[in-house]
Amino acid sequence: MLLQIKNLKINYKTDNRLTEVVRGIDLNINKSECVGLIGESGCGKTTVGLGLTKLIPERKGNISSGEILFEGKDILRLNPEALRNMRGKKISYVFQEPFSSMNPVFTIYEQIREALEEKNNPDSRIAEILKSVGLEKIIGKKNMYPHELSGGMQQRAMIGMAIASKPDLLILDEPTTALDVTVQRQILDLILELKNKMNLAILFISHDLRIVFNIADKIAIMYAGKIIESGPKEKIVSGPAHPYTIGLIDSIPSLEHRKKLFNAIGGKAPLFSELPRGCKFYPRCRFKIDRCAEKEPSLENVSGEHVSRCIRIKDIIKMEPQWNY
Amino acid sequence: MELLKIDNLHKTFKKHNARAVDGVSFSIFKGEILGLVGESGCGKSTLAKLMLRLIESDKGSIFYKDRDLLMISNNDMRKTRKDLQIIFQDPYASLDPRMKIGMVIEEVYDIHENVSENNRKSKTIELLETVGLGETYLNRLPSELSGGERQRVGIARALATDPEFIICDEPVSSLDISVQAQILNLLIELQRRKNLTYLFVSHDLGVIGSLCDRVIVMQSGKLVETGRCEELFKNPKYEYTKTLLKSSLL
């Protein structure tokens, strides 16, 4: 086990009030495993990613409880220096908008050099990195700035920076969302290739199940600050056991769906300040019964490592899937 | 019935000497959803803007109701835009941040004067209800709305003139997949109810495949392939269309 998150809770400050947006998350990532973390905007998924290396500024919020064990050591208890050695080295990040994550006044070379663990003879190592992320074209072009690259190339450069320190864990937060389909596919292929070559463990954060179905080994689905279903990819694809997951799968546009209305999830995600009682998905759920509003369900076993936070698991898994994936 | 006929349309941006739209011809039939796919930078948004004369073409013609839109006066074009509307990609950027939602819609009536002043308020409320928002949104600012709600406002604004043709320029590509499905449902329902015609611009073949009757594929300013959706998805002829299909996560 490379990373073990136990009962992680994170609060944000709004108007001097604390709002809990990550409400107790457990998640494990093994060596060279890709875990997809799925959810709508505002469900807390990005916060989980940032919280892993305590990247939430104190004026904005805090981690109120939990443990984040990385190779057995609790990241939340590390001293500042040890934490710095972890961030960007053992655990590195790639964010959604490559251009706003890079420094516009430094060259690509300078920015990759900064991330290298071994500073001796950087040029040959940088060339190696550029080659491994498919940027052979800019090897030797030391005066190249981020704005001179296209969106896809910028994202490749970002991935180059992220792997320069030979990390064990890569956190990818919607790395392909701003990109075109063809470029998106190339970036996903690149991520898979690097994962296999470098034995990388990956936490892939996204709102798009299609992408995660293509890349992840394990999937966790988040709603209103908690994981509501998780398990091996195959099990989630073939037999989703939470109404929210079913709704997300039914929202995927495809040729099979032709000219039909989507069986979309109604309403919108609740605000953290106005969470409903009981199951947080209850008001939008198409399988709800009165009992759902009584108490928030706990994660129940479906089969093997597949778990779901729903009191009607047994009824739901019996249903024939209506989609064709 | 042919609603719009685009013939040999050209647009070069002089600064970069880029032929954004390079001799494009196609027709749109009444009541259909025509998909327009292609990568960023292939000229698809430029084409959409040329069709409504939001930017001026260099050459070509756009026939609508026996008139060439490129030959009529600006004033006539402004009147014609009542029938030809557009929904933009970025609902954040296409709404004035200081304008309340009710005003966004009523402004349309001020410009086109298609609704009498006494009726504007009730019409606005009716329209907001049509797109699933309702009266409570009248006095809200765009910043108080989610991405999906803003796009609903964009749709309401386009519907305010009671158009027969709407260009949907990537209307769902910045939205979450769950919200995307809601907005697509709304667009499908409106199209059926009002017998609208759409030009649906997207780079997501999943969205195109689930919605469109026919597709045109664009690359570097040119149309490279046209066909019925099912056929084009099963037997793409051009290499570029094949790459697009292979890349998409269908």
Image: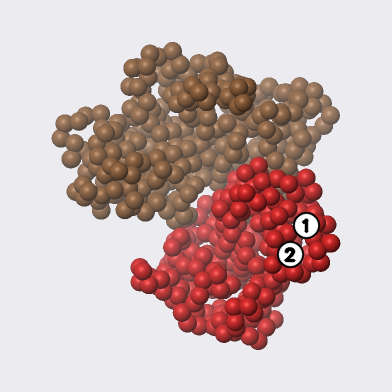
Chain colours: A brown, B red
Residue B50 horizontal/vertical position (percent): 53, 73
Q: Which chain carries label 1?
A: B
Q: Which chain carries label 2?
A: B
Residue B124 makes an appearance in the image: yes
Q: Residue A169 lies in what quarter of the image?
A: top left
Picture residue at 43% right of the left edge, 17% below the top = A75
Picture residue at 67% right of the left edge, 75% below the top = B79
Question: Does the CB distance between marks 1 and 2 fall below 8 Å?
Answer: yes
Pointer 1 residue: B124
Picture residue at 63% right of the left edge, 85% below the top = B67
Above or below for B39 versus B70:
above
Which SS class for mark 1?
helix
Picture residue at 48% right of the left edge, 74% below the top = B223
Residue kind at label 1, given as amino acid type: Thr
Residue kind at label 2, given as amino acid type: Tyr
Mark before the other along the chain sequence, 1 or 2 = 2
Name the residue at the left extreme: A121
How many residues crowd around disc 2 within 10 Å: few (fewer than 14), some, or many (20 or more)? many
Pointer 2 residue: B109
Residue B148 as seen in the image, left or right of residue A76: right
Residue B38 as seen in the image, left or right of residue B1: left
Q: Relative to the observer, which residue lies in front, A309 or B7?
A: B7
Q: Residue A125 lies in what quarter of the image?
A: top left
Which SS class for mark 2?
helix
Residue B65 horizontal/vertical position (percent): 67, 83
Residue A62 horizontal/vertical position (percent): 53, 20
Residue A260 makes an appearance in the image: no
